[in-house]
């Protein structure tokens, strides 16, 4: 098949075995070419800018920068690139969130190879595609839900950098570690932290972590010591 007609795909998942499996499944189709693999949300954004893929297959639960924020940043930088969420979550609220952030499709990880390749082709054409088990709720993703309102509120109030700082704090990283991850000074991290707390009216790290879990920024399993 003419490689010029191939659909270029970037895979973003923090599990190597998952990425390897996805690559094997997709490249077996012949008309799909995997042009990169990312293990973190930040790496996904950087590789998307570099490779400019037709489609990004994105997990939600990503370290350093979650898949939701990575989706927002990629869509802003590369509006022609389509995002296909592939997640273990089948909660309506997650579907609502990623659709608001510009994703074109949502599949659960139990999806068959045939459905995955079909989804990639459909969203590359400009269509939307959802797992059959969540298709009904996806058609009504504009409905108001508490979780959805929370994410919408967050997206409107926090900058991309503030969301990055919030995630790293919620993952248990100290200010010095956050600074090293983002390539900024500790003083700048402290300023971002203060602004996030002011905007969200939250005054301690435990509260920020609970908020991050509720908003889908991190998974509850990331921090098991929250009281």
Image: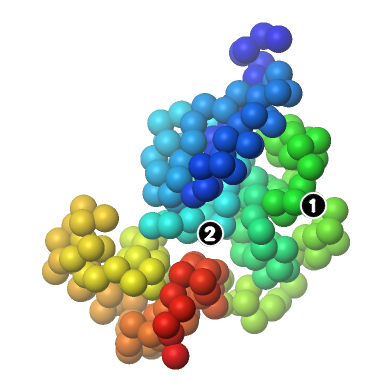
Image position of 106 (left or right of 191) = right
Image location (x, y in percent) of residue 214: 54, 78
Along the line of sight, which residue is nearer the eye, 186 or 22?
Answer: 22
Q: Relative to 190, does residue 96 appear above or below in the rendering?
A: above
Mark 1, Cα crowd under 10 Å, few <14 / some 14-19 / many 20+, is many
Q: Are marks 2 and 1 in contact (CB under 8 Å)?
A: no
Residue situated furthest front in the rendering: 17
Along the line of sight, which residue is nearer the eye, 177 or 68?
Answer: 177
Estimate the spatial distance between the alpha carbons at disc 2 and disc 1, rounded to whole Å.
18 Å
Which quadrant of the figure contains the C terminus? Answer: bottom left
Along the line of sight, which residue is nearer the eye, 197 or 11?
Answer: 11
Taking the image as drawn, is residue 89 in sight?
Answer: yes
Residue at figure coordinates x 34%, y 82% from the top left = 205
Image location (x, y in percent) of residue 193: 27, 75
Taking the image as drawn, is residue 68 in sight?
Answer: no
Please give the residue where the numbered disc 2 appears in the rendered image. Answer: 61
> SS at mark 1?
loop
Residue at figure coordinates x 63%, y 36% from the top left = 21
Q: Locate residue 123: give its quadrant.
A: top right
Mark 2, Cα crowd under 10 Å, few <14 / some 14-19 / many 20+, is many
Q: Relative to 143, does residue 8 appear above or below in the rendering?
A: above
Image position of 121 (left or right of 94) = right
Residue situated furthest top in the rendering: 2
Residue at figure coordinates x 64%, y 81% from the top left = 146
Please give the residue where the numbered disc 1 appears in the rendered image. Answer: 131
Q: Locate residue 206: give its quadrant.
A: bottom left
Residue at figure coordinates x 34%, y 76% from the top left = 196
Specify how the rendered protein is coloured: rainbow
């Amino acid at each position: 098949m003419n490689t010029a007609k191939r659909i270029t795909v970037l895979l973003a998942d923090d599990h190597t075995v998952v990425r390897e499996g996805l690559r094997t499944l997709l490249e077996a189709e012949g008309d799909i070419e995997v042009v990169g693999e990312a293990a973190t949300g930040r790496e996904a954004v950087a590789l998307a800018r570099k490779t400019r893929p037709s489609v990004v297959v994105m997990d939600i639960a990503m370290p350093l920068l979650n898949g939701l924020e990575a989706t927002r940043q990629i869509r802003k930088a590369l509006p022609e690139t389509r995002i296909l969420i592939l997640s273990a979550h089948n909660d309506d609220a997650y579907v609502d969130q990623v659709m608001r952030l510009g994703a074109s499709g949502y599949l659960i990880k139990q999806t068959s190879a045939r459905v995955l390749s079909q989804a990639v082709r459909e969203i590359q054409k400009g269509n939307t595609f959802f797992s059959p088990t969540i298709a009904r709720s996806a058609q009504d993703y504009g409905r108001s839900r508490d979780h959805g309102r929370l994410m919408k509120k967050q997206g409107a109030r926090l900058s991309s950098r503030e969301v990055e700082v919030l995630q790293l704090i919620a993952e248990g990283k100290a200010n010095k570690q956050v600074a090293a991850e983002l390539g900024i000074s500790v003083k700048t991290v402290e300023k971002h932290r203060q602004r996030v707390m002011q905007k969200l009216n939250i005054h301690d790290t435990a509260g920020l972590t609970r908020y991050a879990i509720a908003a889908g920024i991190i998974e509850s399993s990331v921090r098991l010591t929250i009281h």
